[in-house]
Image (cartoon, helix red, strand yellow):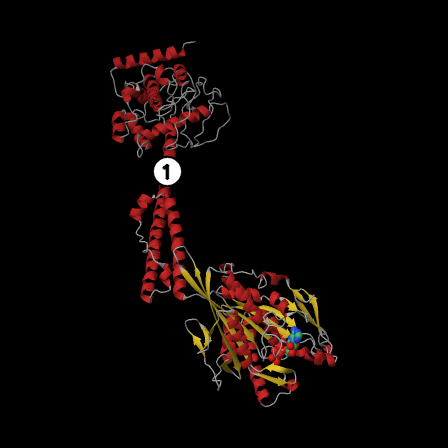
């Protein structure tokens, strides 16, 4: 096993697709940790000769175990072993191709081609194999022709080949490749492609626009072919500063950074919108940290070593700060070295970074190996948020176009919801679509034209936003209206309930339609004409009611608000309640009938529909019934026979309704269809006394019919003089005083009707 990987590495940089079809959206929104892999070189010839033991072993799953540490760290009390875990660990026998395949560099290149800033950097002690990993063994580029398919090629050349393959696959994208190569030697930036005779250092500046550091006047080479990139690599490698010391004969004395800039133009839509993405990949070969005692550096090499160590130390501080969540948002000392300035975006900005930590397996390098692995473990905790780099103008246009699309969809949706047709929408819409653009010309457009274009989109967005806001308002208004109507309905229902309960208590409006057919004396609806459908006016209702009844209605407040027609509803409802209460029962609980508004017609009562006219008849007949009984003193028996049609329960205690609106069974039996017993009495209209039966107690009529207490006919125990005198006043069915002759006529007819009703069979 030459390569071992952790499970999570598969979901990170190692899931290269081999193409550029990945959607960048799913990458750009999330934070990525720096991808860290470790490569252990084999023991060198020198180390083998010295029979140095290897202290490194590989338990698998991306772990690396360092053994035999007791004498090195913490003395005899220190830990014997140390285990580290990384995304991928390359064992000493891993080849250059293995590193290329499994380090994640392929995905890095794909992302660079898609517009991300990516960085691959090698870190480790001197002689650990950084340059070997990136570019191959020493001397590869000196005085000999590079074999394109050499197994020694490092990641850089393999990446070039991979990149060109990708570029050739995507014929729909137009790529422009450029490359630069610099080194940071003794804290000076030197252009390796244009070093000049004096190796004049270049300035590192801060770009406000791009918000990162850049090297001023760095030479960039156009690379149309793979050969061009290869030439850049060769040239830079030849120009970089190398030196020799005790640990590495061909030691890099500087940090190098080879950058390939990848600009891609991609057609985004049918109407010819092109967007340009600018990705890049940095290959950074850091100079190795070295213990000057071990390397036995002196003079120039010592100064180089000090500078190298200093910049690596600053890099270490930055990594430590960035990996600590508490310090991450604080000050990061990027400006303390040129190296950290140029790596700032890769470490904590918008880039994607791969760190390759190179270690030596030799026991003599144990402390450096531990130090490198600790460094790498810290770097693994650093998070970056990769974003695609685009031309700001084009990015703006693309963003605006997307916004327009989203708003347009929202607009359509709102129109559908509000049921606004296309025809009407044309009149409502204020949106003026931007003129047709020749987007092919986008690249050649001068800034003024581009500004106009952006303005068009911005205006369109604004108009759509405004219109959508209006549509949202309309929708809200409709919803509010709907709520108001619902609330009004509720209120009306409540009022109806109140009216209905008042009707239930009312002595004058019991419901029974048939009664009218049984007595001659009952005025017909044509006479009263109270509750016709067309007669809704309260004035009219008042005018056509007899004065005495109207007074009762006024006292009770019935129909004050809604007119008589509402009483009709209550009558109907009472009818229903009555019919439902016909079942023999013990005491029934009160239920306030609800009057529905705008509901289907009421269901048939007693097998036939109960119409409004019947309600009218019922009311009228009940009024007549009261009048008959009271005015003519019809014998109780006869009255009872008449009452058999009355649906209301009687209350023989003569008390007012106690609020319980439920129906009570009559004292003479539970069946409400049977003739009520003499002990029965109205709940709301206390009996005025019995002429020929009942409890024989003289009672004073308490209902308001007639306007004042009308004394009942004398009972067994005799009546007070005042009551008898009052009884002597003769009144017609409407309560008006009449002559004795007329009165007797009424009385006779009523008695005859009662006798007919009472006759057996
Ligand atoms: N994986 C490897 N397989 C075989 N040889 C290796 C490997 N890694 C390194 N070497 C050899 O070890 C020596 C030192 O390697 P290299 O120069 O790459 O180290 P370095 O880390 O770049 O050192 P420095 O920091 O001093 O530049 C070279 O001769 C190189 O060929």
Q: Tell me the quadrant of ligand 1.
A: bottom right
Q: Nearer the viewer, residue 753 or 10?
A: 10
Q: Quadrant of the N terminus?
A: bottom right
In which quarter of the view is residue 488 placed? top left
Q: Is residue 299 visible?
A: yes
Image position of 316 with respect to 108: above or below: below
Number of residue marks: 1
Q: Nearer the viewer, residue 641 or 477?
A: 477
Residue 284 place in picture, x, y as percent: 55, 74
Q: Is mark 1 within 8 Å of ligand 1?
A: no
Residue 584 place in picture, x, y as percent: 50, 23
Q: Residue lying at the far right in this picture: please name it.
A: 51
In which quarter of the view is residue 439 placed? bottom left
Mark 1 neighbour class, 10 Å CA radius: few under 14, some 14 to 19, many 20 or more = some
Residue 279 place in picture, x, y as percent: 48, 67
Residue topped by disc 1: 489
- For mark 1, give the secondary structure: helix
Q: Nearer the viewer, residue 546 or 417?
A: 417
Q: Quadrant of the C terminus?
A: top left
Residue 481 place in picture, x, y as percent: 35, 43
In the image, 528: left or right of 680? left
In the image, 493: left or right of 250? left
Residue beneath the point at 50% across and 65% down: 113
In the image, 459: left or right of 345? left
Q: Is residue 653 visible?
A: no
In the image, 84: left or right of 744? right
Image position of 46 with respect to 259: above or below: below
Q: Nearer the viewer, residue 103 or 505?
A: 103
């Amino acid at each position: 096993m030459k390569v071992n990987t952790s499970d999570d590495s598969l979901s990170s940089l190692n899931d290269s697709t081999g193409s550029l079809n990945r959607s960048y959206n799913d990458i750009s929104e999330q934070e990525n940790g720096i991808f860290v892999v470790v490569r252990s070189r084999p023991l060198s010839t020198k180390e083998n000769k010295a029979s140095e033991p290897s202290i490194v072993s590989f338990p698998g799953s991306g772990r690396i175990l360092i053994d035999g540490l007791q004498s090195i760290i913490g003395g005899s009390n220190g830990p014997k072993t140390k285990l580290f875990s990384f995304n991928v660990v390359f064992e000493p026998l891993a080849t250059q191709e293995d590193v290329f395949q499994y380090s994640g560099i392929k995905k890095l290149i794909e992302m660079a081609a898609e517009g991300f800033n990516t960085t691959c950097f090698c870190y480790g002690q001197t002689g650990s194999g950084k340059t070997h990993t990136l570019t191959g063994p020493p001397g590869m580029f000196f005085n000999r022709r590079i074999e394109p398919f050499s197994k020694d090629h490092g990641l850089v050349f393999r990446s070039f080949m991979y990149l060109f393959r990708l570029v050739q696959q995507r014929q729909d994208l137009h790529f422009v490749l450029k490359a630069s190569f610099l080194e940071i030697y003794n804290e000076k930036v030197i252009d390796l492609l244009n070093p000049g005779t004096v190796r004049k250092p270049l300035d590192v500046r801060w770009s406000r626009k791009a918000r990162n550091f850049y090297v001023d006047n760095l030479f960039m080479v156009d690379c149309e072919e793979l050969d061009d990139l290869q030439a850049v690599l060769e040239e830079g490698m030849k120009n970089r500063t190398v030196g020799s010391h005790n640990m590495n004969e061909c030691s890099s004395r500087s940090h190098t950074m080879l950058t390939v800039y990848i600009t891609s133009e991609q057609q985004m839509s049918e109407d010819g919108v092109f967007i340009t993405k600018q990705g890049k990949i940095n290959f950074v070969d850091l100079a190795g940290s070295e213990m000057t005692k071990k390397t036995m550096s002196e003079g120039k090499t010592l100064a180089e070593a000090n500078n190298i160590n200093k910049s690596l130390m600053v890099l270490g501080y930055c990594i430590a700060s960035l990996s600590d969540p508490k310090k991450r948002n604080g000050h990061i000392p990027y400006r303390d070295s040129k190296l950290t300035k140029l790596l700032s975006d890769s470490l904590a900005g918008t880039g994607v970074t791969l760190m390759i930590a190179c270690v030596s397996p030799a026991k003599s390098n144990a402390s450096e190996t531990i130090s490198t692995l600790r460094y790498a473990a810290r770097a693994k905790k650093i998070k970056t948020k990769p974003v695609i780099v685009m031309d700001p103008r084009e990015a703006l246009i693309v963003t605006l176009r997307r916004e327009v699309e989203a708003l347009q969809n929202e607009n359509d949706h709102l129109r559908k919801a509000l049921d606004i047709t296309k025809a009407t929408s044309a009149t409502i819409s204020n949106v003026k679509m931007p003129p047709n653009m020749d987007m092919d010309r986008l690249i050649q457009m001068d800034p003024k034209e581009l500004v106009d274009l952006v303005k068009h989109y911005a205006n369109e967005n604004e108009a759509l936003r405004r219109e959508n806001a209006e549509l949202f308002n309309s929708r809200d208004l409709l919803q509010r209206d709907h709520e108001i109507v619902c609330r009004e309905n509720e209120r009306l229902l409540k009022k109806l309930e109140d009216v209905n309960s008042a009707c239930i208590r009312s002595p004058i409006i019991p419901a029974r339609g048939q009664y009218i057919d049984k007595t001659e004396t009952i005025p017909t609806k044509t006479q009263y004409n109270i509750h016709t459908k067309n007669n809704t006016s309260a004035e009219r209702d008042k005018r056509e009611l007899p004065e005495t009844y109207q007074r009762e209605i006024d006292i009770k407040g019935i129909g004050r608000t809604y007119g008589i027609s509402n009483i009709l509803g209550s009558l109907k409802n009472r009818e229903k309640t009555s019919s439902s209460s016909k079942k023999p029962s013990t005491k029934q609980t009160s239920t306030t009938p609800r009057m529905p508004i705008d509901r289907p017609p009421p269901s048939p009562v007693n097998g036939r529909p109960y119409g409004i006219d019947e309600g009218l008849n019922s009311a009228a007949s009940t009024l007549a019934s009261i009048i008959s009984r009271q005015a003519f003193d019809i014998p109780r028996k006869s009255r009872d026979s008449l009452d058999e049609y009355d649906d209301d329960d009687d209350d023989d205690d003569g008390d007012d309704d106690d609020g319980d609106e439920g129906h009570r069974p009559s004292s003479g039996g539970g069946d409400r269809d049977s003739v009520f017993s003499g002990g029965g009495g109205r709940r709301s209209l206390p009996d005025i006394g019995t002429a020929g039966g009942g409890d024989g107690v003289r009672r004073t009529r308490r209902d308001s019919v007639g306007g004042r207490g009308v004394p009942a006919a004398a009972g067994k125990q005799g009546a007070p003089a005042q009551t008898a005198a009052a009884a002597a006043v003769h009144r017609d069915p409407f309560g008006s005083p009449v002559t004795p002759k007329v009165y007797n006529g009424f009385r006779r007819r009523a008695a005859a009707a009662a006798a007919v009703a009472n006759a057996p069979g």
